[in-house]
Image (cartoon, helix red, strand yellow):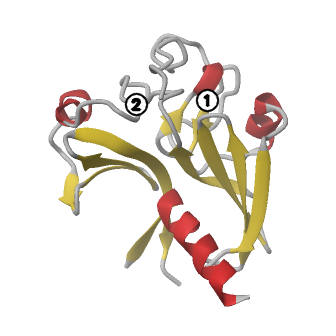
Amino acid sequence: MKKIIITALAALLALSLAACGGTSPDTGSDAATTEPTVNAQPSAGHTFAPNGIAITIGAEPSSVLAALGKELDSFTLESCAIDAKDIEYRYQGFRLNVTYPEKGEPYITGIQLTDDTFQTPERLYIGSPAEDIKMAYGPDCKEENSFYTYTQGRSTLQFHEKEGLVDQILYGYIFDEE
């Protein structure tokens, strides 16, 4: 059985671990019109391309992190999915989650758009009309609790709708349940 781990869950996990111990979108920064400067593993999963830097779910992160430059902030926590350390790197307009397993190579496990700075390759952004989700990505999605989930390989792309607008965009990695 597979378990979907998304960036939103990572944020909730961070909050639970802590308890235990408006501008217009930049339409020039999408992957549809910009050639990526970093070529991750496109077959691995969904890709987001801020400033032309392709970030693919499931890909090795070193070239992406180098291309993105210094993050605004970061925090580390133990992974709840596998024996690993997760680091969330915060950049203007999005957060990037990377999992560093105890054994094996690190990989990108989540992206959360945090404002309308960036958009998906199909030009959806925080604040887009929710009716545009299926127009851009098609009807083949799982709908649950105002989330529209699209799966590609071992990744998901989720949109949350609130009051007719997209208020969350999340890319996540699908882990096998241990």
Among numbered discs 1 and 2, the one appearing first in the sequence: 1
Residue 87: x, y in percent? 74, 60
Residue where numbered disc 1 is placed: 54
Residue 105: x, y in percent? 77, 59
Say what secondary structure mark 1 lies in. Answer: loop
Rounded to the nearest whole Å, what is the CA distance between mark 1 and mark 2?
17 Å
Say what secondary structure mark 2 lies in. Answer: loop
Q: Is residue 62 left or right of residue 131?
A: right
Is there any visible trace of residue 93 in the rendered image?
yes
Residue 14's place in the image compared with 142, above or below, is: below
Quarter of the view holding residue 54:
top right
Give whichever of 110, 154 is nearer the camera.
110
Residue 131: x, y in percent? 16, 34
Q: Residue at x 53, y 47 (%)?
A: 112
Q: Residue at x 46, y 14 (%)?
A: 27
Observer-side mark, 1 or 2, equals 2
Residue where numbered disc 2 is placed: 125
Q: Say what amino acid the circle numbered 1 marks.
A: Ala
Residue 106: x, y in percent? 74, 58
Outermost residue to the front: 22
Residue 161's place in the image compared with 145, above or below, is: above
Q: Residue at x 52, y 11 (%)?
A: 28
Quarter of the view holding residue 18:
bottom right
Give whichever of 152, 169 is nearer the camera.
169
Q: Is residue 65 left or right of residue 128?
A: right
Callout 1–callout 2 Cβ contact below 8 Å? no
Q: Say what amino acid the circle numbered 2 marks.
A: Tyr
Is there any visible trace of residue 81 in the rendered image?
no
